[in-house]
Amino acid sequence: ILSNIYLPIPNGISDNNTVNWGSDEIDPLKTAAADIIGKMIEGGDVTGAATGVKDAVQEQAEGAKALIGSKITESITGVNKLSREQGAVLNNNLELLFKGPQLRDFTFTYMMSARSSVEGNTIMKIIRTLKQGMSAKKSNGFLFIKSPHTFFLGYFKETELHPYLNKFKECALTGLSVNYAPAQYSTYVDGVPTQYQVTMSFKELEPVFDDDYGNDYTNIGF
């Protein structure tokens, strides 16, 4: 840890936990093809899979015939013959499937007002630390660029993490905006500005998983 920065908990703090779910569809033709290809890859009974597909088609010969005819017509004319004439569409077996976790991001805005030049210099050091900490590093004669420092955030109640507010995983500081004159530009005699507005955007390095919460209910978790 290179530096510690203590700031008051701002107004309007919130978190937003999301996971990626999306619709997925597979019609009988794709199911049959996937079954055969899967058997080929796994070294299974390809002949048996093909026979099963053939039997399934034969059991619904009329439907298969109408479907193939409609597909041919649609490929030539662009008209969905099956839907127009029979009010039917191919069963696409639509389902909502889990696609994966998502990373959380957080934005904090602080109005930092200096009551003296000393406080103004402290604010300057805070901003300087954030700016330099989020900057990429040169490496090996500038042949490579190394990643910036990362940040550990937390809401504290005295010296412990606040059990009723959310936790954070290790974060990258992805954006930092500084307004040097959020109201009227003014400075102390030595040139130290009396007020800054700082907006920080953080993003966690990894998603939140079920086992990150543990088995107790002594805190609200992530």
Image (tube, rainbow, N blue to C red):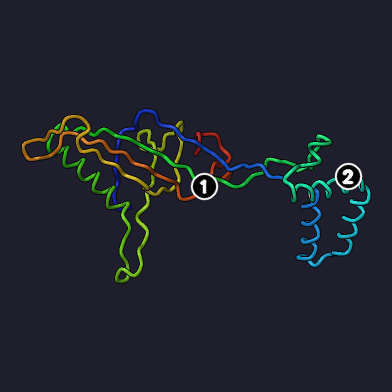
x and y percent of residue 49 in the render? 86, 59
Q: Amino acid at mark 2?
A: Gly
Q: Which residue is located at x 92 percent, y 48 percent?
A: 61
Above or below, 178 against 49 in this view is above
- Of pointers 2 and 1, the one earlier in the residue sequence: 2
The residues tagged by marks 2 and 1 sit, at their Cα atoms, a distance apart of 46 Å
Q: What label does residue 207 carry, if any?
A: 1
Secondary structure of the residue carrying tag 1 is: loop
Q: Amino acid at mark 1?
A: Pro
Secondary structure of the residue carrying tag 2 is: helix
Above or below, 99 against 113 in this view is below
The outermost residue toward the front is: 77
Residue at the spot of label 2: 63
The one nearer the camera, 219 or 175, is: 175
x and y percent of residue 153 in the render? 38, 43
Would you say 192 lies left or right of 36 here?
left
x and y percent of residue 129 in the render? 26, 49
